[in-house]
Image (cartoon, rainbow, N blue to C red):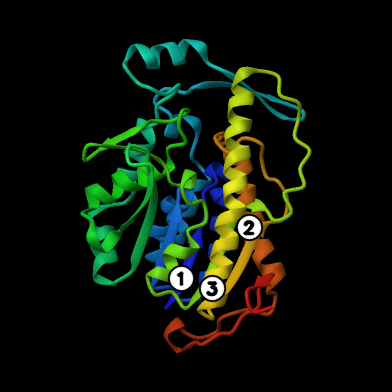
Amino acid sequence: MRALIISGGGSKGAFAGGVAEYLINDCCNKYELYVGCSTGCLLLPHLALGEIDKIKNIYTSVSQEDIFSISPFIITKNENGYDTKINHFNSVLSFIKGSPTFGESLNLKKLIQKNITVDEYDRLQKENKQVIVTVSNLTLNQIEYHNSKDCTREDFCEWAWASCNYVPFMSLVNKNGYQYADGGFGNFVPISCAIENGATEIDVIILENENQSLHLPEITNAFSLLFRTFEFMKNTNNSKDIIIGKLIGMNKNIKINFYFTPDNLTDNPLIFDTQEMTQWWKDGYEYAKSIQPDSFCLVPQEDVKLKITTKESIED
């Protein structure tokens, strides 16, 4: 069974979309299992259905307003990128409403429900494509995985939304008596989950630079400090997820192909800039093409068995 895994990464998901477009359309890779967390969960259902143009249009047109019902920060564009500060008014408004977070992402929930239609979800079930989303159960302090084959459409949309909520900047999700947050807090690159579900060859798109040799700008406010601290802890856990996945893969003789971003796309993946995301989708496609320039498909996928070589393989 071949699996596609996409890590978390917020707006950087556009880059993953470009990589996936090349792997699916140009390389004719057929996946039966799709596993992801956070932004990966939003990409995978449409990739599984072959609706790449639809998800591409969403990722290259989405804005801050499409994600946040209450935005926790004020964004100012400058020559070096963006300056981000806490939106004190909105944060106070959020707390007055009884929310434990600085901002709320109810608009993202509506966007997910709108774009994963009843017909599409029925097709996903009939075609026997499995899409697994990763969530962090903060009540039980454990990771959970939810498979589309075991969920109603309504539940799947809620799990996908929960997986995307980077608290305390986005909503804390209450479901079934528990509280949930971004799946990336628990397993940013869920390789082990794919293997446990029968994957024998895996393509993994990781929305981080492989070397992590960054020199980030100086921290100038409380928001930047809080966000940078969360990112530091997440990146540390990311390395562990990858190492564990590699070790399990080697032990079970599973081929794992990795695709990292060639550089640091953004310091704040919670900023959704349509121009940047449009470019990142193109960059992801071209990057995947540069790794495997000779991979192409001339006949229907059902008749193709194509061996590809990626940037990094467990078997190397």
**Which residue shows up at 71% across the image and 24% down it?**
219
**Mark linked to residue 3:** 1
Is 248 or 316 nearer to us in this picture?
248
Q: Where does label 3 land, which residue? A: 249
Residue 188 in sight: yes
Badge 1 amino acid = Ala
Q: Is residue 234 above or below residue 65?
A: below
Q: Which quarter of the image is occupied by the C terminus? A: bottom right
> Callout 2, which amino acid?
Gly
SS under mark 2: helix
Q: Is residue 79 left or right of residue 299?
A: right
Estimate the x, y position of residue 70 in percent, counting from the top left: 42, 22
119 to the left or right of 45: left
Q: Is residue 296 above or below residue 82?
A: below
Mark 1 vs mark 2, CA separation in Å: 19 Å
Q: Mark 2 highlights which residue?
A: 284
- Asked if residue 47 can be seen in this view, the reply is no
Q: Amino acid at mark 3?
A: Gly
Q: Earlier in the sequence, mark 1 or mark 3?
A: 1
Which structural element holds mark 3? helix
In the foreground, 257 or 154? 257
Q: Can you tell which quarter of the image residue 11 is in?
A: top right
User: Residue at position x 70%, y 46% from top?
Assistant: 264
Mark pair 2, 3: CA separation: 25 Å
Q: Give the quadrant of the N terminus.
A: bottom left
